[in-house]
Image (cartoon, rainbow, N blue to C red):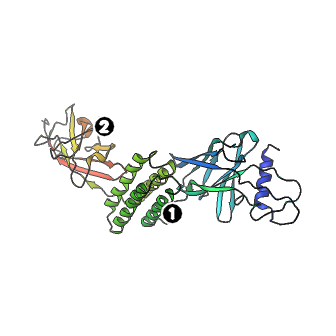
Amino acid sequence: MKSNQIYISLILSLLLNLPALAQVNLPEFPSAIEVEPRVVAEVDTILQGFTYQYQVSNEDVALQDIWIFMVEIKTVNFSATTPFDWDSSNIMRSNISVVTWGANDFPVMITPDSALTGFGVSSMGLPSVNQFFASGYIDLPQGEFDFKKGTNDIFFNSVKGFTIGPVDPPDPFDASTFLDTLKSYTTQSLPLGWITDQTTADKYEGHFSTAQMQLQQQDTTAARSELQTVLQEVEQDSGNVLASEAYALLRFNTEYLLDQLPVTVIPVDIDIKPDDDPNSINPKSKGVIPVAVLTDQNFDATTVDVSTVVFGPAGAQPVHNGHIEDVDGDGDDDLMLHFNTRDTGIQCGDTEASLSGTILGGQAIKGSDSINTVGCK
């Protein structure tokens, strides 16, 4: 075997460009489909976009080594990383574009009953259901070949399956259409084994249908709440009933959708210095001010993202992560926070102080309560 990049380029050129001329009494172009690929994909966020990492295994029943692996890419802006002694390139054919990895020598091919990592793509594209192609190593016959239909085309003379890869965000963006896409990803994930059972698939499809209906009714706040429930549940279901592919599809596309929806501020009830009336504050105090965020029938205080909360004119941050307790005695879990008095910016004569932040998922909250400043003479 010629173990260099020129040989890989030659084979790819043959597979992609040779004309299919069927002739008698000539050796057939060999099949490259006697591989049994299994691909596991994971997606992580980076500063701008996502990284897609692929582990490619070849089942023990395979009769060939995998020496070419390709993933469909639905964007033009991406970069690829390769395993040791593999090379990568980009191939465009009619309506499909793929990033292609090829092994440079026998020792690095994916043999039966083995796996290889290091196949990676970085892109701003969102996770979508994309095709993959895996081709087995072939000894190229000498002289002329008898091409059967498709054997001279790597997109046909390979084993195909589905994984996840990047796709450009829709432009123009329509929230209802994007929710149809999310429902489609849910439906596709079930037969692919990325969602393990129908009940789970129905649950997520129900969330997306509900959010779609709420947006049609111009109730953005309710739709955002429904989508935030999705984000909470994918974290709970990840690794259990959601494989890494379904997790990426549902999480990152839902987050993108939330980013596109108008942000409405949820009004919340807060209680500054619970059990103190009036809420007396000495701006010169070196102590802390307790502030409770209250749960009611329209708001769950336990969903507050404490890391985003600020209080007072100067935007003081909590001195700790808060704790859950029933502050107002109504049987609901409330959130209790504390702020350094001098950090709040409260001045003598102020009659009100406000708290703001977001809940998990990013929706803004804001609440105010009356105060009475003391010790100002």
Describe the element under mark 1 as helix, strand or loop. loop
Per the image, the residue denoted by label 1 is 170
Place of residue 168 in the rendered image (x, y in percent of width and height, measured from the top left): 55, 59
Circle number at residue 346? none
Per the image, the residue denoted by label 2 is 321
349 or 187: nearer the eye? 187
Task: Specify whether residue 176 is in view.
Answer: yes
Residue drawn at x 35%, y 48% is 360
Q: Mark 2 is on which residue type?
A: Asn
Residue 232 position (above or below residue 114): below
Q: Is residue 339 left or right of residue 149?
A: left
Mark 2 Cα within 10 Å, few/some/many (few <14, many 20+)? some
Mark 1 Cα within 10 Å, few/some/many (few <14, many 20+)? few
Q: Mark 1 is on which residue type?
A: Pro
Describe the element under mark 2 as helix, strand or loop. loop
Residue drawn at x 88%, y 63% is 25
114 or 234: nearer the eye? 114
Residue drawn at x 42%, y 50% is 234
Q: Is residue 56 left or right of residue 222?
A: right
Residue drawn at x 49%, y 52% is 246
215 or 310: nearer the eye? 215
154 or 304: nearer the eye? 154
Label 1, label 2: how far apart the Cα atoms are: 38 Å
Residue 172 position (above or below residue 308): below
Residue at far front of view: 61
